Amino acid sequence: MTRILGSKWKDFGDELFTFKWVIFGVIIYIYGLRGKEQLYYFSVHTELSLNKWDLLHHFFSDVYLILYFILPVLLYRSISIIISDFDYTVLIRLGSYRSWVYETLNKFVQSLSIATMVWGAVSGVLLIGAPSFAGWSPFSKLDASLSETQILQKFIDTPFLALLLHFSLLILSLICIHLILAIIYVKLQKKGIVVFTAVFIWVYSGVSFKLLPSHASLFNLCNYLILHSGVAQFGNIWGPFAIVIGLATLVVWSVNRIDLNTKIFSKLRYNGGYIIFFALIVIALWSGMREKLGKTIWDQFIFMFIGVSNQTFSLKSFLCYWVIYFGFIYLIQLYLQRELSEIGYYKLLRYQSISRWFWGWYHKIMLYIGFYLLILALFALFISSLKRFSFDFYISIDSSVALFEVFYHFFVNGYLQVSFYVLFVFIISWLSKETFYSLLVICILSIFMFPGLNNWLIVPSGLNSMAYILTDYSIYRISMVLSLWDVLGIVFLLYIFHKQDIDF
């Protein structure tokens, strides 16, 4: 054991004093001098003194330094370790891909530790001559965004804790990136793909930092590498950590199941449509928020599912409704198509009746609908909380609307509306056996969501839009209309089953 530790420390020391890390430190020093002069200039200009914590946070949290130098260097080191260490003799010795991935992680953490040490040593040199204070400086307490500390001090009590949290976020994010690259290489074993992925991550980090608007902060990679950026965008400390920890949990779960017989990537390819659908849901909900109009998370909840009505129409809201609800119906339709074409008739033999088979299938779909609406609601509230909206139990955009009405309309009318969509698609699929016709009738049905085409709210299309809760329409009347259509759909199906009269 002592010999192994001694060998690892020797390897650590040998790498620490290599020429590449000297060049690494020189570049940071040159860039740090420029940043130091800039901070002193701002201090003189504002007539507020700064201290060593301001400089230290700037050296370790500079966006351009991290995105355009630190990140590409560590990405290069990551793929170098992954590609050079992938050898079947090593795999035989380690016994599994899982052990190999963690072995590459150990080497990457060693390089990451050396980079941090060099970075810290250079920063220590740059701190020489700077004034020292116990806490946040007068300059950091200025209500501006001239430095990292002016953002962090609004959320964190001490500069030491802020620096510790920054390093924790940065290191955890870099570890996640390395593990993702290692998983990709293990499953595909193509150097070009893992190199392309690393380059894409680097380019995307710069693009997301420069081009993404503030309301798309969830997709800004910079927010998960640099604490003050994440805090400024999310409006709280725990938002960036929650996302990164969730990703880390998923990645570690994948690594622990990446053994030789694991079919993770086959499952991902099989479930690719669900992954794309989830991504579209996130985009639709995030883009639905209206930060300048609503004050509470319940206001944003209404905006995310606003949809359209006869009095209000927005193309973006219409498309979001399409993604959230018709996207779900499309997945249900694909599931139904597989049932009918692959195993549907075997189940009919077991159930001895078309009606019994239908109720067995529809019972599961009813549960899926309720679960889907619940997940949508929780996820929408979670996204709203990331933007620090109030949790007060009232609707600020319309005081006459009660929270009970919001939940009733979303869950009850939403359930009835989606149930009708499912029944409608089932009827078309059962009669035609063609996917195209189901898509066509959904498109035709959605036309009635446009203003002036459903003034009496008789056609069951888009009636669960939250826009109706802000109008004079009765949500309870909508419930009656949707319930009637659901009953008619079921009666019509039972009639079809009876007319076909298949004997088992």
Image (cartoon, rainbow, N blue to C red):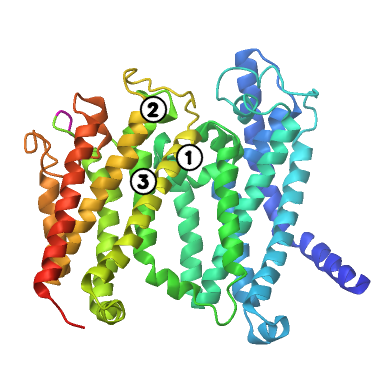
Q: Which residue: 23% across, 38% down?
A: 479
Does the CB distance between marks 2 and 1 fall below 8 Å?
no
Task: State the image coordinates of residue 15 (x, y, percent, origin top left).
Answer: 77, 64
Determine which of the numbered discs, if any, sits on residue 288 in the image.
none
Determine which of the numbered discs, if any, sits on residue 283 in the image.
3
Sequence-earlier tag: 2 or 1: 1
What kind of residue is marked 1? Phe
Q: Quadrant of the C terminus?
A: bottom left
Mark 1, secondary structure of its residue: helix
In the figure, residue 502 lies in which quadrant?
Answer: bottom left
Dot 2 corresponds to which residue? Answer: 403
Task: State the image coordinates of residue 228 (x, y, percent, origin top left).
Answer: 59, 35
Mark 3, secondary structure of its residue: helix
Residue 120 in view (yes/no): yes
- Please report the bounds of the magenta region as a residue range: 311-315
Q: Between marks 2 and 3, how big is the CA–CA gap?
A: 25 Å
Mark 2, secondary structure of its residue: helix
- The kind of secondary structure the magenta stretch mainly shows is loop
Q: Between marks 2 and 1, how big is the CA–CA gap?
A: 17 Å
Name the outermost residue toward the left: 453
What kind of residue is marked 2? Leu
Looking at the rendered image, the disc whose residue lies closer to the viewer, 2 or 1, is 2
Q: Residues within 10 Å of mark 3 (few under 14, many from 20)?
A: some
Does the CB distance between marks 3 and 1 fall below 8 Å?
no
Q: Residues within 10 Å of mark 1 (few under 14, many from 20)?
A: few
Viewer-nearest residue: 92 or 449: 449
Dot 1 corresponds to which residue? Answer: 382
Sequence-earlier tag: 2 or 3: 3
